Image: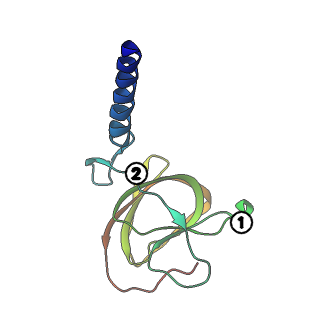
Amino acid sequence: MRNAKKVATVFTGAAACAAAFTPAAQAATTQTAHGQQTTAAPRTAHNCTIGPPTTSVVFTWPASRHHGPTCVNTLGPTALGAKFVNVCPGDYNISLLVSGTWIHVPHSQSFTANGPRTISWVDVLSRAGNFPPCRT
């Protein structure tokens, strides 16, 4: 009986150790638009509320996807890896990783692709101020 308890304690300790280090192992590592290497907790994009204008960065999916717009409103890099046809930066200055090239999009402009383009990452650089919101 004593050996069984020792084995159980070893397995429990190993599981606790693995659980403690998993978030660090899953942290996203990428190079930002300005060439800095960053390791951050993964940020996620979320579905925008349909209808009201928003100050978030808004990504518009191709109509064939039957999907509402996607929003990002946190500073720093966020992985996307999806095809979009339009990006409205809202109140933010952003950079997009499109086909391996970083494209800077200031708050007062939008990025419109000729057909769906895969955007791998968005790096939300700074909040610019109160500018016309994006439509969702």
Tag 1: Cα neighbours inside 10 Å, few (<14), some, or many (≥20)? few
Residue at the extreme front of the image, as rendered: 1
Q: Could you say where residue 130 lies in the image, as x and y percent from the top left?
A: 36, 86
On screen, residue 59 above or below 130 = above
Q: Secondary structure at mark 2?
A: loop
State the CA–CA distance, disc 1 to disc 2.
Answer: 28 Å
Q: Is residue 70 left or right of residue 62?
A: left
Label 2, residues with CA under 10 Å away: few <14, some 14-19, many ≥20: few
Frontmost residue, 65 versus 39: 39
* Helix, strand or loop at mark 1: helix
* Residue ID at (34%, 29%): 13
Which amino acid type is marked by label 2?
Pro
Quadrant (top left/top right/bottom left/bottom right) for the C terminus: bottom right
Q: Quadrant of residue 104?
A: bottom left
Q: Quadrant of the N terminus?
A: top left
Residue under circle 1? 63
Query: Is 21 situated left or right of 132 in this image?
Result: left
User: Contact (CB < 8 A) between labels 1 and 2?
Assistant: no
67 on left or right of 27: right
Which coloring applies here? Answer: rainbow
Q: How many marks?
A: 2
User: Whole-percent x and y of residue 33?
Assistant: 33, 54
Residue 106 visible at all: no
Judging depth in this view, the residue of 10 and 107 nearest the camera is 10
The quarter of the displayed image where residue 129 is located? bottom left
**What residue appears at the point 39 percent right and 85 percent down from the top-left corner?**
131
List x then y, in percent, for residue 22.
38, 38
Image height of 12 relative to 108, above or below:
above
The amino acid type, in three-letter code, at marker 1 is Ala
Residue at the spot of label 2 = 42
Residue at left offset 56%, top offset 85%: 52
- Return the residue nearer the eye: 124 or 102: 124
